[in-house]
Amino acid sequence: MRPALSRAEPASRPPDGTRRARLRRDWPLLLMGLPMFLVVTAFWWVPTLGNVIAFQDYNPFSGGILDSPVIGFTNFQQLLEDPQFARAVANTLGITAFQLVFYFPVPIALALLLNSIMSPRLRAFVQGVVYLPHFFSWVLVIAIFQQMLGGAGLLAQTLRQHGHQGVDVMTNSDTFVLLVTSQTVWKDAGWGSIIFLAALSTIDPNLYEAAAVDGATRWRRMWHITLPGLRPVIVLLLILRLGDALNVGFEQYMLQRSAVGSQASEVFDTFAYFSGLRTGDLGYGAAAGLFKGVVGLVLILVANRVAHALGERGVYSRS
């Protein structure tokens, strides 16, 4: 016969899975995250409601959002009929595709090289060197490239001293995609390798030891252990990059627009700036921005479905 519970025995606590138990356990974390939640709400979610002006003949000086007439999809129709918009989208997608091939693998390769350095002191020094350009502004980065590759730069002067005609890479519209990709690699490849270095640290070292005992070479260990360990992170970042396909940047292209011309440097963000903000047609600019967001969402959903088909989790799981 089971003994009766004494009155002094405390009441049973709710199971860990209940909402009250989770709140009691995680309230310090929720409190620390509250300021960032308020910032995101105030400066991201609330302004997102302003996308309604994409469907209006918006005039901020005569009534604002509440009194501006609704014109439906007229702004989007004009957007799709604008040849400058088509050129901006083509340039943006072309640069994105080029950088997916020639920039996206660079942080992965750099992380593999850094991970292979055995000396912790040397590794820390190299990491500091390759991380540093990320903290430079685009003004400084482009100024450095101007001093190296401009018409009066180091490369042109060296060629002239040896009897060759000088070159000005900074004003050549035909090689503009190579120029901006090289600038992006120099500035952000080191910073982008941090995520892959973190993923490499989660791979069990015993796997490498067992493979070495079985006679696997360094290349085979990388192919059968390292790359499969990095594959979930690579797929995740690739999906996010595809979703960000229409967002190659603004400042980098704006600073070099006058040097190479708008035919080569007009991207989606510069188009939205010149056609919306500079002309005062804010509804048209909002339509361009909303189009960009919808396309990015579609690309993320499609890429995530492909990741599920390949057996990866992607951005979110199917369950």
Image (spheres, rainbow, N blue to C red):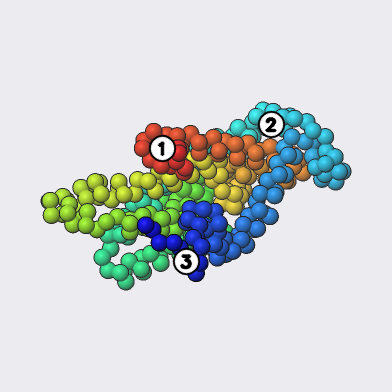
Compared across the picture, whether 260 is left or right of 73 comes to: left
Measured in 3D between alpha carbons, the distance from the residue under mark 1 to the one under mark 2, in whole angstroms, is 31 Å
Classed neighbour count for the residue bearing mark 3: other residues with Cα under 10 Å, few (<14), some (14–19), many (≥20)? few
Q: Nearer the viewer, mark 1 or mark 2?
A: 1
Q: Which residue is identified by label 3?
A: 6
Residue 208 locus on image (x, y percent): 21, 55
* Nearer-the-camera pick, 11 or 143: 11
Q: Residue at x 24, y 58 (%)?
A: 205
The amino acid type of the residue labelled 3 equals Ser
Residue at the bottom extreme of this rendering: 121
Compared across the picture, whether 64 is left or right of 78 comes to: right
Q: Residue at x 38, y 64 (%)?
A: 127
Mark 3 element type: loop
Q: How many marks?
A: 3
Where is residue 203, by image quadrant?
bottom left
Q: Which residue is identified by label 2?
A: 76
Q: Residue at x 41, y 67 (%)?
A: 128
Mark 2 element type: helix
Disc number placed over residue 307 in the picture, else none: 1
Residue 278, can we see it?
Answer: yes
* Nearer-the-camera pick, 67 or 169: 67
Q: Residue at x 20, y 52 (%)?
A: 218
The amino acid type of the residue labelled 2 equals Phe
Mark 1 element type: helix
